[in-house]
Image (cartoon, rainbow, N blue to C red):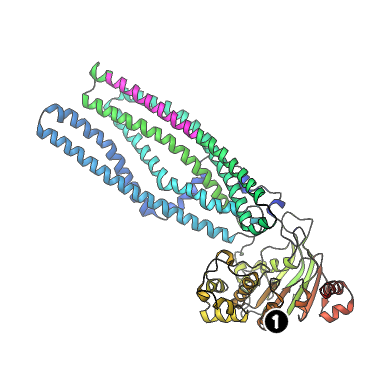
Amino acid sequence: MTTPGAPDSEPRADDIPAQTAAAAPRRRDLRPLARLVPFIGAHAADAVLAAMFLLVSSTATVGLTFAVRQMADKGLSSHSAHMINQAFLVLAVVAAILAISTGGRFYFITKLGERVVADLRAALYGHVMTLDQTYFLTVRTGEVLSRMTTDLAIVESMVGSTISVALRNALTVVAALTVLVIVNPALTGFVVLVAVLILAPLFIVGRQVRRLSVKAQERFADAVGYAGETLDALDTVQAFGREASATARFRAAVEAAFRVSLARIGARAGMTALVMILVTGGIGLVLWRASLAAFVDHTMTPGALLQFVLLSVLAAGSTGSLGEAWGDVQKTSGAMARISEILDARPAIAAPARPVALPVPAHGAVAFENVTFAYPGRPDLPALNGFDLTVSPGERVALVGPSGAGKSTVLRLLLRFYDPQSGVVRVDGVDIRQADPGDVRARMALVAQDAPLFSGSALENLRFGREDATVDELVDAARAAEADSFLAALPEGFDTALGERAKTLSGGQRQRVAIARALVRNAPILLLDEATSALDAENERLVQHALHDAMLGRTTLVIAHRLATVLHADRIVVMEDGRVVETGTHGELIARGGLYARLASLQFGLEAA
């Protein structure tokens, strides 16, 4: 592989002079929430049932005030046991309807929230899997994970709870005001005035809460992103003794997130206090004015007074809750804006509208025609510059050259992780830009220098190469890669879980499992990028023998710094500065006395020493 900073190395995120998603400007409206509509619409039955129970529970809430009024005016004042019993029976029936409808509302709205977030999480992950390498040069993996966890948790809270409470309170306010107008129009105007005085400051404070919420989410994403990077390279951090500085940097990121969160909490606490003051004061004013109407002006009955007070309390309380819910809705809008940024990202590498089909059966021919390519953010530093290469079906070609010559870039372009700025890359005669990337990659098997494995069992890691492979095929591939002996010796054999990144295996063992995974793929084109660099001399000899058999009948591109591993290639292509400078067999290149001869002399001389 190439050294960091060399022309052949991929640029890091901090090399790209682009605005990261975390620093992107945020919308100050609720339009991002519209992204949830299709996900809710996909479960219309649950949404309809939730809405039905919501409507019934809101109606029953207001209906309680009618029952209380009847109990006061016709039940208690009648001094009749029958009338009192009847009034309390009506009150009990309405309360029962309220309880059942509230339970139904909670169940279906919570179920809908869980379902919507599950679908959204799956859609988000599936979309991330389609994004090309360029996207991850500008957005850190930790930030993407933060959006898939923290931001989605915020969305889940709103869809599964806040939205239900907000809609219930909104319906309650509308219903209560409607009934208040019927009971006493003059006093209703007074109540509306009080409600406006309550809502106005809450919306103003709510904007501040939303701004601080978005900022807190961004700071938290920064902290998670850095944590992901350091944990992923924990061995390097510890090897350089940077645990303390990494912890200090993470603590600083966490503290920055905490300070912003503290400001948000302070604003939210102030809003809560404001709600209580305004709501309590509003209820007191309404109660004072209604008491005058009932006991001084005699324009209301005691039951009407009681109903009016209850409706006023409902309206004021619901209005206050709406103000608090508004802060949650704005916070969710910020989270959805961040999630939408990922969902709206479009990969530069995608299948054309009408992809050209690759020929069947596959031949394995590869061709690079005058290819020039520079990594994003480095247009003045091309990794390949007028690169030409033709590989015949079944031919074994080795790419050698100094670090930064462009060797690994050749494989990345062939796998269509990137597209060249000029020139054409062909597989079996087809320009791969005109084909489906999935079809192109299906014809290749890659073994990289540090091929990642996963936390499942050995069989699951091997089956990653081809899902429909049988157990016998998986075991045969392991045997061919000289991996069957140590896998079979594990506590549960091939079914043993290998741990995160298969770190329970040695570096050489992991590499042999990766080679076996590539053999399982049974692809016509085999790509080996320093595939044996992690093996000791004995294991390298065994695996080279296995790879020699695997190469038979397959087109093979081999990248190796250790020239001893490419001596038996059909052709050695020597690269420098993104171009082909020499080509031939080992003997021919040594005889020419060019770059390859100098590399061989230096390497073999050092090895001899």
Whether 22 is drawn above or below 183: the answer is below
Q: Nearer the viewer, residue 276 or 534?
A: 534
The amino acid beneath tag 1 is: Gly
Side of 130 where 326 appears, left or right = left
Residue 308: % across, % down: 28, 27
Residue 267: % across, % down: 51, 33
Whether 372 is drawn above or below 293: the answer is below
Which quadrant holds residue 575?
bottom right
Q: Residue at x 71, y 49 (%)?
A: 17
Quarter in which the C terminus is drawn: bottom right
Residue 318: % across, % down: 37, 34
Asked whether residue 365 appears in the rendered view, the answer is no
Side of 583 where 201 appears, left or right = left
Residue pointed to by mark 1: 394
Is 101 magenta? The answer is no
**Number of numbered discs:** 1
Whether 151 is drawn above or below 541: the answer is above
The magenta stretch is 267-291
Side of 433 where 299 appears, left or right = left
